[in-house]
Amino acid sequence: MKVLVIGSGGREHAIVTSVAKSPKVDKIYCAPGNAGIAALAECVPIGAMEFDKLTAFAEEKKIDLTIVGMDDPLVGGIVDAFEAKGLRVFGPRKNAAILEGSKAFSKDLMKKYGIPTAEYAVMHSPEEAREYLKTAKFPIVLKADGLALGKGVLICETPSEADAGVKELMEDRKFGASGDEIVIEEFMTGPEVSVLSFVDGKTVKIMASAMDHKRAKDGDQGLNTGGMGNISPAPYYTAEVDAFCKEHIYQKTVDAMAAEGRPFKGVIFFGLMLTPDGPKVLEYNCRFGDPEAQVVLPRMETDIIDVMEACIDGTLDQVDLKFADNAAVCVVLASDGYPVSYEKGFPISDLDKFDGKEYFCFHAGTKFDEKGTIVTNGGRVLGITALGKDLRDARAKAYAATEWVDFKNKYMRHDIGHAIDEV
């Protein structure tokens, strides 16, 4: 069969790598792809938001399955556009992708259906927000309602910081229309855990747990980023936590979306905080996480094509979703200065040492220059992932592998997986 993957980052490289393992697949396209993806798929110069061009390409090439990696096209309705042309596509429709597309919607959904989350209020104007903050307890969290590249969340320690945050989100419109409404949320404490799941509208099957490292610098210091590394499984995700979430969060979310006339098919990413009062939902995403996909998918033993087709067909209950009894650690090699400002266009050396079995080099921000050399083309450049018998083994291997490649202004955190030593 022919498969089209839409996206250009490390997540999409991980998806393409999993798709390439399937004996059912004989041709992979990726739009627009990157220099690493090009080793496994034919990259097509079509942007992820160019729905008309993408559907026309899928029709022309007789694509059997399209997989959407990114949030923007999903929230924008790309699945509806493909289905309107009679094309098979993996991902939620627009009316279900709102689960990620609007934090106000997701918070209201959780409140209505009794899914544990932080106390919150939705603000429609800067004046309303400032009035609410006069009696708020600090620290407090401000969130842009819409998509903001994972960066529209501000933790404010003082009233003056919160006032500046309201200005940044709602008046300066740092994230555009995403800040037209904001959610003000109580500040929760505890370890964060990421749990990805496959969903077919009624059945939910959980993938291996993971744990992201969002801050740019060691010790969880510095600015929030798209993710500087990840580990799987998450050390804090115990059998007790799993049982609680299965009863009170996962299935209840899927049932709530169906009850609202928004059946969800695709991947639900549950961002959880394990608070002293029990697990609570921090956020939902409507697609694979990045770099969660880079540690979860290499551990998956079930054919990804079988799982995705079952999600589309509503037969996920018949799939035996299996993950290896091992661990994975991903260390992101970034451009120094990320996430604020950084240079790009630097050649990357020694990319041929990864076997794709124990060691993976997932390209996030790369391209070919005019000479055909692979160069840096983003803030997050590569995701170096290793599998090991346990988290310590995987971490040692991943950090050893970060030394295999080099480029000018290479930067990374040196404490990915610090939780391993704290549990």
Image (spheres, grey):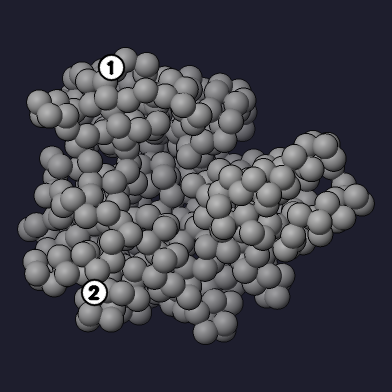
- Amino acid under disc 1: Asp
x and y percentages locating residue 184 in the rendered image: 74, 54
Whole-angstrom CA distance, mark 2 to mark 1, is 40 Å
Residue 306 seen in render: no
Q: Is residue 211 left or right of residue 380?
A: right
Q: Secondary structure at mark 1?
A: loop
Position of 203 relative to 407 (above/below): below
Q: Is residue 332 left or right of residue 118?
A: left
x and y percentages locating residue 99 in the rendered image: 54, 66
x and y percentages locating residue 310 in the rendered image: 30, 73
Circles 2, 1 touching at the beta carbon (< 8 Å) = no
Which of pointers 2 and 1 lies earlier in the amino acid sequence? Answer: 2
Figure quadrant of residue 29: bottom left
Q: Label 1, on which residue?
A: 406
Q: Label 2, on which residue?
A: 88
Q: Secondary structure at mark 2?
A: loop
409, 325: nearer the viewer? 409
